[in-house]
Structure formats: structure tokens, C-alpha cells
Amino acid sequence: MLSVIQSHIQSSINVKSALLQNTALLGQINEVCTLITTAYKNNKKTLLAGNGGSAADAQHIAAELVNRFYIDRPGLPSIALTTDASILTSIGNDYGYEQLFSRQVQALGNQGDVFIGISTSGNSPNIINALEACKEKGIITVGLTGLSGGKMAALCDYCINVPSNETPRVQEAHILIGHIICYIVEQEIFGNNK
């Protein structure tokens, strides 16, 4: 079992090393941090969505923004579209699972907000539909995906493709990227209040 444990740890390190060496991806992460910081400075919000483990990541990132990351500071408006059971089940029942997030984007999103769609494959139909709803409302879109980017690559304003096709490794990198975004945004807005 020890060799299996070591193999998984090494695999995670390899993906993060590949991410660290990819200057284009690092530049995109930097641009997304600036984008989100600017949105917050303009009284906008972030909306996040994903399925399964990516839903958990959406909730995790939203919680860090609303509550705090490193600094005791005012909350930043962020909504994980994965959390309200009544809304999710009513949309799922009336319109279908593929409309779970697009209906919420239509109801809650405003021009200048930032939507972060998380999908390891880049092909989740409910995320694709949400991205299309964002375009109609002038909401800036960020995708966190795996290596290919799937259909999301062509639909996102910014698509951060983790350099792996292995779902667990992609998800591990997604939460790392989420933490980086939370840290930089918090520092840019509140860093002088440490």
C-alpha cells in the first residue's frame, strides 16, 4: 500500500509542477485574479457552479470569499449555485438537470459579475448552459477544467485548463487555483488592513 500512497502523492506533485512551469496558465490565473478583484471593487459578485466534487469546490471557494481566507475583513459577495436544495429540486423537476445553473444565472446574475464554472471534463451540460446564459447577461466567465477544456474552452472568457486528464489530480489543482484566487483577491482588496 505504501507504494500506492507514494504514487498518488507523486502524481499530484507532477500535475502541480506542470502547472507551475506553464507560464500561459499562470498568466491566465493572474488575469482572473485581477478580473475578480476589479469586479468586487465595482460592487459585483461571483457565482460558482460545478457537479459532484466540483460542486464541493464551488462551495469551498465561495465560503472563503464570503467569510475570510487569511485576513479578518468584510465578506465578499459570492454565491455557490449548488447549495439550495429547494431551488435545485424545483428547477430539476420543472426544467431538467441541465438547466440547474442557467436558471439561477438568469435570476441572480448581473452584467459585470463573474461566473466560475468548474468541470474536469469541460463538457458538463448544466455548466455549458450556464455559460451561455452568462453571455446573454454580460457576465464574465471563467472555466476551471482539465487538459482539453472540452466544450467550455470555446465558451469561457478565461479557461484555465489543468494539465491532466486524471479527475482527482485535476480537482486537486482546481482547489489550489481557487485558494490562490482567494488569497490574491483578499490581499488586493484588504491587504493593507492586516
Image (spheres, rainbow, N blue to C red):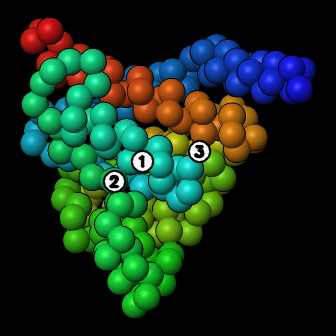
Residue at 42% in and 55% down = 49
- Asked whether the residues under the numbered discs 2 and 1 touch, taking CB atoms below 8 Å apart as contact, a structural biologist would say yes
Occupied quadrant, residue 16:
top right
- Amino acid under label 2? Ala
Residue at 31 percent across and 76 percent down: it is 86
**Could you tell me which secondary element the residue under label 2 belongs to?**
strand
Q: Which residue is mark 2?
A: 80
User: Is any part of residue 193 visible from this angle?
Assistant: yes
The amino acid sitting under disc 3 is: Thr
Q: Is residue 188 visible?
A: no
- How far apart marks 1 and 3 lie (CA) works out to 13 Å
Q: Which mark is residue 145?
A: 3
Locate residue 31 relative to residue 153 in the image: left or right: left
Residue assigned mark 1: 58
Instruction: Indicate which label's residue lies in the foreground, 2 or 3.
Output: 2
Q: Residues within 10 Å of mark 2 (few under 14, many from 20)?
A: many
Which x, y percent locates residue 99? 44, 76
Q: Residues within 10 Å of mark 3 (few under 14, many from 20)?
A: many
**Label 2, label 1: how many angstroms apart (C-alpha)?**
6 Å
- Identified at 47% across, 22% down, the residue is 27
How far across and down, in percent of the image, does residue 137 sit? 26, 64
Q: CA distance from mark 2 to mark 3?
A: 17 Å
Q: Which quadrant of the rendered structure holds the C terminus?
A: top left
Residue found at the far bottom of this picture: 94
Residue ID at (26%, 58%) = 138
Mark 1 vs mark 3, foreground winner is 1
Q: Note whether 87 is above or below 193 in the view shown.
A: below
First in sequence: mark 2 vs mark 1: 1
Horizontal side, residue 106 vs residue 189: left or right: right
Type of amino acid under label 1:
Ala
Q: Dots 1 and 3: beta carbons under 8 Å?
A: no
